[in-house]
Amino acid sequence: MEVTIGVQNVAREISIETDASAADVHKAVQAAISEGGVLELTDSKGRKVFVPGHALGWVLIGESERGKVGFGRE
């Protein structure tokens, strides 16, 4: 699952690949915002990302883009 996070007053976005489901990420984002806590996500390599809930600008949760194999045309 690919997750992209926009942080308030920061020009660059944070993009991670995680093994968590979309529902789990959604629940973590909602908890960080509503409780004023910290959004904590673990990427697919085991590294942790922490973002204060009050600093979240936006979060995009989407499927990973699968690489194509072969010489097909589009």
Image (cartoon, rainbow, N blue to C red):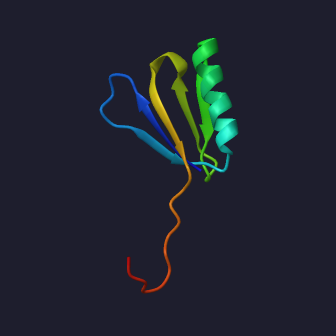
- Looking at the image, which residue sits at the far front? 74
Specify the farthest residue to the left. 11
| x and y percentages locating residue 40 in the rendered image | 61, 31
Residue 14 versus residue 17 in the image, above or below: above
Residue under the point 50% across and 70% down: 67
Residue extending farthest to the bottom is 71
Quarter holding the C terminus is: bottom left
Seen from the viewer's position, the closer of residues 25 and 73 is 73
Q: Position of residue 61 (x, y in %)?
A: 54, 41
Q: Is residue 20 left or right of residue 64?
A: right
Q: Quadrant of residue 7?
A: top left
Q: Decide which of 56, 70 is in the foreground and name it.
A: 70
Q: Is residue 73 above or below residue 26?
A: below
At 59% from the left and 47% from the top, the residue drawn is 43
Label count reads 0
Q: Locate residue 71 relative to residue 48 in the image: left or right.
A: left
Placement of 6 over or under 45, stated as above or below: above
Q: In the image, residue 70 lies at what x, y percent? A: 47, 85
Q: Position of residue 17 (x, y in %)?
A: 55, 50
Kindly identify the residue that appears in the image at 62 percent across and 52 percent down: 44
Asked which quadrant contains residue 50, the reply is: top right
**Nearer-the-camera pick, 23 or 15:** 23
